[in-house]
Image: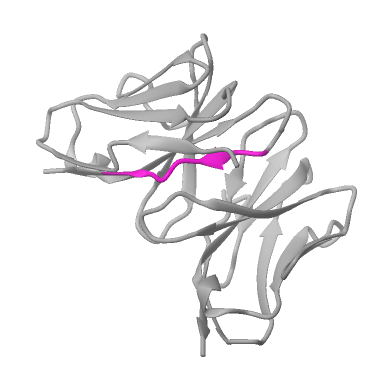
Amino acid sequence: DQQVKQNSPSLSVQEGRISILNCDYTNSMFDYFLWYKKYPAEGPTFLISISSIKDKNEDGRFTVFLNKSAKHLSLHIVPSQPGDSAVYFCAASAVNTDKLIFGTGTRLQVFP
Amino acid sequence: GAVVSQHPSWVICKSGTSVKIECRSLDFQATTMFWYRQFPKQSLMLMATSNEGSKATYEQGVEKDKFLINHASLTLSTLTVTSAHPEDSSFYICSASEEVLRNEQFFGPGTRLTVL
């Protein structure tokens, strides 16, 4: 049972444009969400997070939006840069637990 | 920023041997450490959660006798894959978190295990 889903396995975006990565979840007990960036053969790198009491969090070029009623979150990267090319994982954590449940990842490719 | 290291970064072993992977938090005390496994083109799957000085909590379907986890200090956790078989070949990643930074897990660079 995949509690965190990233339905788009890949995304290709032109440099300078906006990249939108989507994530859906099923567990209503999740109250904290994170996005990680990962290169092959490396560990994930934390990008940005959001608590369920918010619907938006912004950090530089990265913005995460949370729609609790739809159980959906998205990561916006603008403007996209070639260095953003990587696999992006969303992750979720439930109340009173440190465990992270990861989505399946979306491979983003930013081309010039 | 918080740094987590893993050693070795890659290892090749024969079937039936045991392999130990170390995970260290270099500049902070990790009250909790996590071990993940990633198959090619798949998500990171949590294997177990360990707290310093206590037994690890394993996720459903993970054999505790096969994947031995020791968290002897606040900066070191080890994962030992016992009697490794080719199906154990995978990318193993650890992460660590501090008590006050809930959900803030810092990941190691991962260890590529290949069992021949």
Q: Please provide percent x and percent y for residue B71.
A: 45, 17
Task: Name the one closer to the observer, B65 or A21.
Answer: A21
Residue at x-position 75% and y-position 66%:
A60
Tell me which colouring the rendered structure shows: one colour
Specify whether A77 is left or right of A88.
Answer: right
Residue at x-position 71% and y-position 52%:
A26
Q: Is residue B24 above or below residue A20?
A: above
Q: Is residue B38 above or below residue A56?
A: above
Q: Please provide percent x and percent y for residue A82.
A: 52, 79
Task: Name the one closer to the observer, A2 or B53.
Answer: B53
Q: Which residues are magenta?
A: B104-112
Using the rendered image of the protein, determine whether residue A108 is visible from the camera's viewpoint.
Answer: no
Query: Is residue A64 one of those drawn in magenta?
Result: no
Q: Please provide percent x and percent y for residue A80.
A: 63, 79
Q: Is residue A74 above or below residue B94?
A: below
Residue at x-position 60% and y-position 44%:
A101
Q: Please provide percent x and percent y for residue A2.
A: 57, 51
Q: Quadrant of residue A66?
A: bottom right
Query: Is residue B106 one of those drawn in magenta?
Result: yes
Q: Residue furthest top?
A: B53
Specify whether A16 is left or right of B70.
Answer: right
Q: How many marks?
A: 0
Residue at x-position 23% and y-position 24%:
B82
Specify whether A28 is left or right of A111.
Answer: right
Using the rendered image of the protein, determine whether residue B86 is visible from the camera's viewpoint.
Answer: yes
